[in-house]
Amino acid sequence: MSERPLTFLKAFCRNAICVGGLTVFLLASCDKPATPPSPAPPEIGFVTLAPSPIGVTTDLPGRVNPFLVAEVRARVDGIVLKRLFTEGADVSEGEVLFQIDAAPYQAMLDAALAALEKAKAAASSAQAQAARFKVLVAANAVSKQDYVNAVASAAQANAEIAAAKAQVETARINLGYTEVRAPIAGRIGLANVTVGGYVQANTATLMATIQQVDKVYVNIAQSVSDLLRLRHEAATGQVAMTGPDGVRVTLALDDGSTYPLGGQFQFSDITVDQGTGSVTLRAVYPNPDHLLLPGMFVHTKLVEGISQNALLVPEIAVTHDAKGDPTTLIVTADNKVELRKLVTGQTYGANWIVDSGVASGDRVIVRGIQFARPGMMVKPVDDSATTAPSVPPASKP
């Protein structure tokens, strides 16, 4: 074989090998999957925390009590002859409510008056005799002892007059007690005795009860722990106390409605109830329409002070871990999600008051929480205009 055909054959083989290798490379390249592009970070909404002054409020149960209560009781013995009031009506101070049989007490007064006249007559005779003996003893017509006895008798007669006058006054007072009068103005309840019933002074028979309800007390029970917490916050400057004259108390009735008139905080008791571990607070409310009835259960909201730098986190941003501890998610400066454990206090509207776990300037996630995981990148969007905590102006001390 000539040298030229051999050279052509070698070149052909080399080209065939190259083409085959390129084909295999291309086929292998087609079988290898392409790398997918990285997914875009999820969009979340956040609000930026900022301190705000808010009123420190406490929701506490309370009971309505009348402003004044007077139990009308018998002060003399006797039969009730008349009842002179309508049960459930308003009565005025001094109004006659019951009439007790006065005949025995009128007789006692008459006897006391007669005894007084008798004592006066005896005293007049004794004084005249003492005056005569004074002249006679000077003339030695009677002994000095007789004169001393006459003077003593006159003094005793005068004392008997005083005693008789006291008996008359006692009889007159007892006669007056047969007309049972209202000691205060207010609304009278049910009569506890009927006409014909017998009442006694020594057992102080209860005849009726009068309650003044034009204004009422609301007694509120506050736990010692809440009271100590408030005092600690006031001492450390976290809360500015409004003072006794500025504490505001609002009422919610048992049907959920709000009492339209505001109350005035009056005092806080200094004794702790050993059974409940609470102290009693008292507020006074006007009650012109008698909407608040004694014994009624109410819910009170006590505005105790002003927290100048409260951090409010929306409730939708707060969840709880497996232990039940409150947590929230925030966006860091490099747009990563971070989990924070919170220490929360009370609720304030649709927000939690947070004591620790977050700080002013933190961006708290309020939208897209279900897509956020700690450590992942996110695309933050400021939702402050739509979901920022609503903070009404705080009352000034």
Image (cartoon, rainbow, N blue to C red):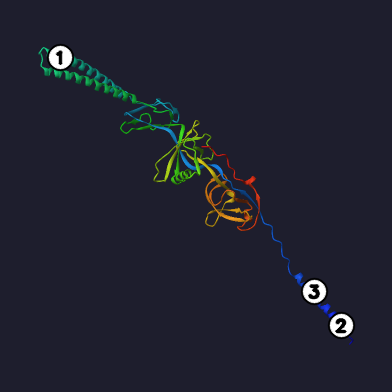
Badge 1 crowding class, 10 Å Cα cut-off, few under 14, some 14 to 19, many 20 or more, is some
Report the residue marked by disc 3.
22
Point out residue 227 in the picture as x, y percentages from the top left corner: 45, 44
Question: Tag 3: residue type?
Answer: Leu
Report the residue marked by disc 1.
134
Q: Quadrant location of the N terminus?
A: bottom right
Asked whether residue 300 appears in the rendered view, the answer is: no
Mark 2 secondary-structure assignment: helix
Distance, label 1 to label 2, CA atoms, is 188 Å
Distance, label 3 to label 2, CA atoms, is 23 Å
Question: Tag 1: residue type?
Answer: Lys
Mark 1 secondary-structure assignment: helix
Discs 1/2, front: 2
Seen in the image, is 373 located left or right of residue 138?
right
Mark 3 secondary-structure assignment: helix
N-terminal label among 1 and 2: 2
Distance, label 1 to label 3, CA atoms, is 167 Å
Discs 3/2, front: 2
Marks 1,2: beta carbons within 8 A: no
Q: What mark, if any, has residue 53 been given in the picture?
A: none
Marks 1,3: beta carbons within 8 A: no
Asked whether residue 54 appears in the rendered view, the answer is: yes
Report the residue marked by disc 2.
7
Q: Is residue 234 above or below residue 189?
A: below
Which residue sits furthest bottom? 1
Question: Tag 2: residue type?
Answer: Thr
Point out residue 61 in the picture as x, y percentages from the top left corner: 47, 42
**Residue 173, image quadrant:** top left
